[in-house]
Structures are given as structure tokens and as C-alpha cells.
Image (cartoon, helix red, strand yellow):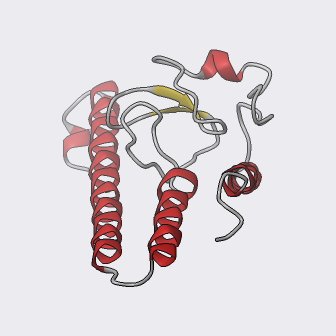
Amino acid sequence: AALAAHVPQEVFNEYLQVRIKVAETDIQEQMEKENKNKVEDLKKKLADVTGSAEKREIDTHRLRILDDIFTLKCPRCKLAFLDFEGCSALTCAGCSCGFCSYCLEDCGEDAHEHLRGGCAQEGGPMYCEHADWLGYQRRRKARMMGDYFATVPEAL
């Protein structure tokens, strides 16, 4: 607050934006580290399994589902993201990739053009409430699970 009294408002606003960006990046890096550690722990547990080949295969499928379907990631650098603030055109904090929060398509630097008229692949609008966005994600994940299970041998 003392800083705000001594600098122009626009400089203070830029300062706040930088602080927010740094905090978001720190949070995202911490969550990515935690997720990576969890995946590594699961991989180690899987490697330590002395059970049947069928159990190992089931565990491998479980890890793929968690990592590839349930963890929303940047399509370019694979950094996980968790936040959604209303605009479906996201920018990765790790690599600055612009991507669609519905279909996770890499759109170069900016996903707004991809979302004009809504996401063609998933049908989501450019702007929506968080609860609605979660509904799109649930449907997307359910469809991906169905597609994935279609590739798994019936014997499992």
C-alpha cells in the first residue's frame, strides 16, 4: 500500500499484474511438481509389483488414464493446469502456448480465433461459468474414457 502512494497508478497496476503472474507461476510449478512426484511414486509402486502380468497391465492402464485423461495439460509442454476463470482461451504459464480449454488444441500464441463461435470439437463457448466448464470437462473425459476402454482387451 505504501508503494501505491509513491508511483503512478498505471505503474502500480503493472506491478500488481507481475506479482499475480509470479504467484500463479509458483503455484502452477508447485502443483506440477507434486503431480509429477505422485506419478513417479505410482510408477515406482508399479515397478515394485510382484503380482501377475494382468495386474501390472491394469496398473499401467490406470496410470495412463490418470495422466492422459484426468490431468488437464498444455498440449505443447504438458504442464498441468487447474484454474479456469471464464475465458476458454488459455495461455500456458510454462511455455506461453495459447490453447483451447475444451479440446486442448495448441492454437499457437492465442486461442481466441479457435473459439470464435465456440470450440468446433467440444462445442464449448469462449466464455462460460466455471460450473458449466466443468460439465464440458466431465463429458470430454467420459468420451475419452470410452474411447480408451475400446482399445483395452476384453480379458482385462
Relative to 130, residue 59 above or below: below
- Residue 142 is drawn in which quadrant? bottom right
Relative to 156, residue 101 above or below: above
Relative to 83, residue 76 above or below: above
**Residue placed most toward the observer, 64 or 22:** 64
Label tally: 0
* Residue drawn at the location 74% of the way across and 42% of the way down: 128
- Residue 5 is drawn in which quadrant? top left
Relative to 38, residue 113 above or below: above
Image quadrant holding the C terminus, namely: bottom right
**Residue placed most toward the observer, 146 or 85:** 146
**Residue placed most toward the observer, 90 or 141:** 141
Position in image of residue 135 (x %, y %): 76, 55
Position in image of residue 131 (x %, y %): 73, 57
Position in image of residue 103 (x %, y %): 65, 36
155 left or right of 107 in image: right
* Residue drawn at the location 35% of the way across and 48% of the way down: 24
* Residue drawn at the location 35% of the way across and 73% of the way down: 46
**Is residue 132 visible to us here?**
no
108 left or right of 37 in image: right
125 left or right of 27 in image: right
Residue farthest to the bottom? 51
Position in image of residue 37 (x %, y %): 27, 65
* Residue drawn at the location 26% of the way across and 44% of the way down: 22
**Residue placed most toward the observer, 41 or 78:** 41
**Is residue 142 visible to us here?**
yes
